[in-house]
Image (cartoon, coloured by chain):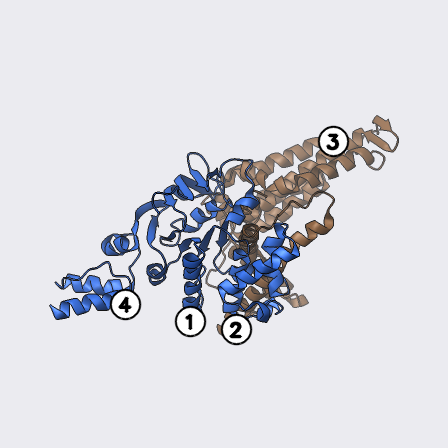
Amino acid sequence: MEKAEPIIRVNDLHHTYLRNTPLEAVALHGVSMEIYPGEAVGIIGRTGSGKSTVVQHLNGLIRPREPGKVIVDGQDLSDPSLDLRKLRQKVGLVFQYPEDQLFERLVGDDIAFGPRQMGLSLEELRPRVKWAMEMVGLGFEEFKDRYTFSLSGGEMRKAAIAGVLALQPKVLILDESTSGLDPRSRKELLGRIRDLHEQERMTIIFVSPNMEDMAELVSRIYVLADGKTVMTGSTREIFARREELRRYGLGVPQVTEVMHELRSRGQPVDVGVLNVEQAVGEIWKILNS
Amino acid sequence: MEDFEFLRNITIGQYLPGNSIVHRLDPRAKITIMLLMVLPITFSLSYIGNVMLLLVCLGFVALSGISVRYILSGIKPALGLIIALALLQLLFYGDSFVPPNMVSVTLFRWGIIHITNGSVQLVVVSTLRFLDLLFLASLLTNTTTTTELAHGAEDMLAPFSRLCIPAHELSLVLTIALRFVPILAEQLETIMKAQASRGADLGKGGKLQFIRTTRQALVLLVPLFINSFRRAEDLILAMEARCYVGGRDRTRLVRLRLTRTDLVAMALVAAFAATTTLFPLPM
């Protein structure tokens, strides 16, 4: 996988909000990352570290400025003649509280909005909407004619994500899109995202403050702090560096925390543990020795 | 629609923290000064008078330490309208306005278009007036927090409560309205970004395609309205939960006090406003 061309390449990205006004605020100064096709990558960082600003560059909502460069699928995003709609079909971005963007009366219509804007005919539209709804776990026949605003919170969230999926993007970015859900909906949604990644080979970029979710979903992590990339590595490597993460105001998943504690009390356990099963394995190892 | 930064264009109503003399003035003094200045600005018709008023407003801006460029950047969204109005005045108001102490002189006439020295003066004067008011309104909101403004307005309205004017409630409405402008702007920005992300073609309806443009606006308006209603409900709940009751028995954390600076500033502006209003300059 590493040998392929990266589908997204971000190089030395800088961004200042409200530039040239008394309220200007530096959001990014020096973010770089490379994301390969078919990967699931996480971005973590405290609030204000620039996570959202970075991902908004990836689908052209914010244009890169000199000297920063963003290349998506071979296209330079600073090119003024770039077709933004084509780009946004390729890179789907789901925001935090995506249910806030629903507007159509019927669920099916809302999900069809994106592909309809692409100019697809009705026959092409239907299977796409069906696929998107099924991917998020909303039965097509059952939900397509329901009133959008009669759905429950979790269903609205799913419908909103389906609205982005209906564009059939190559890359799906989720910017804290699991926050505010109850544990069961959250777990289900994570499972759906994993399916998209594993079965549909979709490239996933996952932004979340929840380290458990990270450990479960992604294989590689970029850590941002004060608008800079400060750590990168595989999920195991990153969570093995607990002290460093703490310095950036971040933590590790709870099972990993337990392993770190055991290690600090002299137990020879592997601290790069990401889930309960692995932890159980490690603990059995010390009990048996 | 390339740039989603709305706050860049909204300069009126945006508080800019600072510690200048204008920032430190009592909000009631600032409101009074603004109202006093509106008098000569409205009544003055002469070139010299208006230039003088503009200089005074610029003087206020200079005292506040806020850059003139920042305030002027707030006109940008309305620039088209202002130019259109000025043009209409210039072309068609030739007959209806004769400057005081002057004879109407026709400069250009063609069909219904009639430009006189009067219409030229009218355009110049109304442009300057607009600038004056922009400076004053921006300055008031740029240097005063919404809480201060609301307290100030409440205090100034308080004497009228005998006439059954609900001063406190009005000031509450004012505070909430002002407070929600940036919140809604931000919300709109997020919704625009989200809809653009799923392929909405914002602001590209074409010039005469009203139906398309309106449909595109719906994509933003429906979510924005739903959001505002929800926020309103949340706010009501939060206020009820804390047993919010407005009115006479309510005390405040900060008590406004007029200082000598406030009084002197108001006196100076009152004198200036009275002189320029009562003794209009020729020309």
Q: Residue furthest left?
A: A289
For marks 4 and 2, give the CA distance: 45 Å
Q: Residue under mark 1: which chain is it in?
A: A
Residue at image mark 1: A184
**Mark 1 in CB contact with mark 3 (< 8 angstroms):** no
| Mark 1 on the same chain as mark 4 | yes
Category of crowding for the residue at label 1, using alpha-carbon neighbours closer than 10 angstroms: few (below 14), some (14–19), many (at least 20)? few
> Considering only vertical position in the picture, is A211 above or below B140?
below
Amino acid marked by disc 3: Pro
Question: Residue A138: x percent and y percent?
Answer: 53, 67
Task: Please name whichever residue, A190 or A43, is drawn nearer the observer in this view of the structure.
Answer: A190
For marks 4 and 3, give the CA distance: 88 Å
- The residue mark sitting in front, 4 or 2, is 4
Category of crowding for the residue at label 3, using alpha-carbon neighbours closer than 10 angstroms: few (below 14), some (14–19), many (at least 20)? few
Residue at image mark 2: B240
Residue at image mark 3: B282
> What kind of element bears circle 4?
helix
| Mark 4 on the same chain as mark 2 | no
Amino acid marked by disc 4: Val
- The residue mark sitting in front, 2 or 1, is 1
Amino acid marked by disc 2: Glu
